[in-house]
Image (cartoon, rainbow, N blue to C red):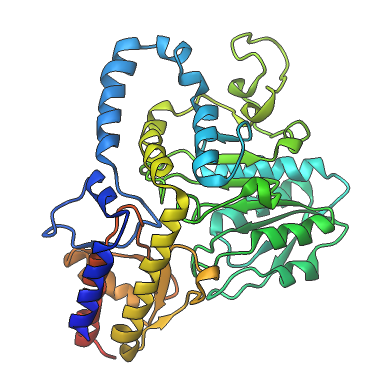
Amino acid sequence: MTDELLARAAALDAADPLAGQREQFITPPPAELLSYLDGNSLGRPLEATARLVDEFIREQWGGRLIRGWDEGWMDWPVLLGDRLGAAALGAAAGQTVVADSTTVLIYKLARAAADARPDRRTVVLDTDNFPTDRYVLEGIAAERGLRLVWIETDPSAGIDPAQVAEVVDADTALVLFSHVAYRSGWLADIAEINRVAHAAGALTMWDLCHSAGSVPIQLDEWGVDLAVGCTYKYLNGGPGAPAFAYVRRELLGELRQPIQGWMGHRAVFEMGPGYQPAEGARALLSGTPPILAMVPLHANLDMLAAVGIEAVRAKSLLLTGFVLDLADEWLAPYGVEVTSPRDPSRRGGHVTLRRDGFKSFLTPLWDNGVIPDYRRPDGLRIGPAPLSTSFSEVYQGLRVLRELLEKDPR
């Protein structure tokens, strides 16, 4: 069966229309990195990124100096936001900006949403959402005297429309969930959950960190009110790359984000008394944009726009399906469980495998050039990135895991 699986990996690679994209990434030799399976946590850098960063430092920063602000930098947050909206978010221009971190942007939008619904005193969230989402809402609830309504979600699954329908009511100001659950990879039904929440008069906000650049998103079509996501996972923006925020056009004039800095002012260099927000998505900005940190995003958006998000999703499903097949054949006999959805319509871009004591496997996996991700309790996340991961790479990584399990069968 091993030979058959190896042949299958080779056949999938040979038929992969995105196979050529792998050559555009900076990749260590196999002796140093056999299998990178953590693209859902930090994407690989592009060769084009290295060139763009060097060019930016030498020519734009070094050559133009402060003149660069007048020659384009000032508009990057909105221009990159529009490009991201078109390539990955299903968002028309003028609704998305690139700025700040995910945590800061969640605070800005959630606080603005709560302030825009002063007669409503509850916020709905789920117990297994990513920690920063929960922590930020806890802080806002303390600031504004709001009540948090917690939905208990299965860590092996995720939020369901029926669960939302049970708790939203006329007192709900905001609901906040993740499109793809960080632990299980559960792909939420955004359109239906939005319908349920809107029927109760609540605003909806979505964390897109584990779906942007991996799963097709249609923010405008689905009627999403607010969304935030990072750019360092499937968008390959680099460690700590700036995040993005989306506000539905109809709400841009209604919501007022709470961190009022000079870059969000209607006349940045007027520097007069009193804060007057800029029109449109630019009002979501606060301080000076992290221009140098935005450079890598240009390269990845070029690639994503060229190949199309639908092609990325098609390969992602094949990759995660292959992970499931290898897990069933190789790993299940050693007590490994799949704790991610098997239904492809409900599965995001990664698969979580669980076994008691998996944390102790991280060091030997790394020593063998295999890099997955670990999430408590006892979960290995296998996150192949469609643009940079081959099927043979998945095969080699899980082969090493199987060999380690053979030595520690428990």
Left or right, 171 with reference to 84: right
Left or right, 54 with reference to 87: left
Q: Residue at x 50, y 56 (%)?
A: 215
In the rendered image, which quarter contains the N terminus?
bottom left
In the rendered image, which quarter contains the C terminus?
bottom left
Q: Is residue 393 above or below residue 275?
A: below
Q: Residue at x 59, y 28 (%)?
A: 286
Name the residue nearer the viewer: 211 or 171.
Answer: 211
Q: Position of residue 325 (x, y in %)?
A: 35, 79
Q: Is residue 158 above or below residue 46?
A: below
Q: Is residue 201 visible?
A: yes
Left or right, 225 with reference to 367: right
Q: Residue at x 55, y 46 (%)?
A: 89
Q: Residue at x 59, y 70 (%)?
A: 158
Residue 271 appears in which quarter of the rendering?
top right
Q: Position of residue 17 (x, y in %)?
A: 32, 55
Residue at the left extreme, as displayed: 31
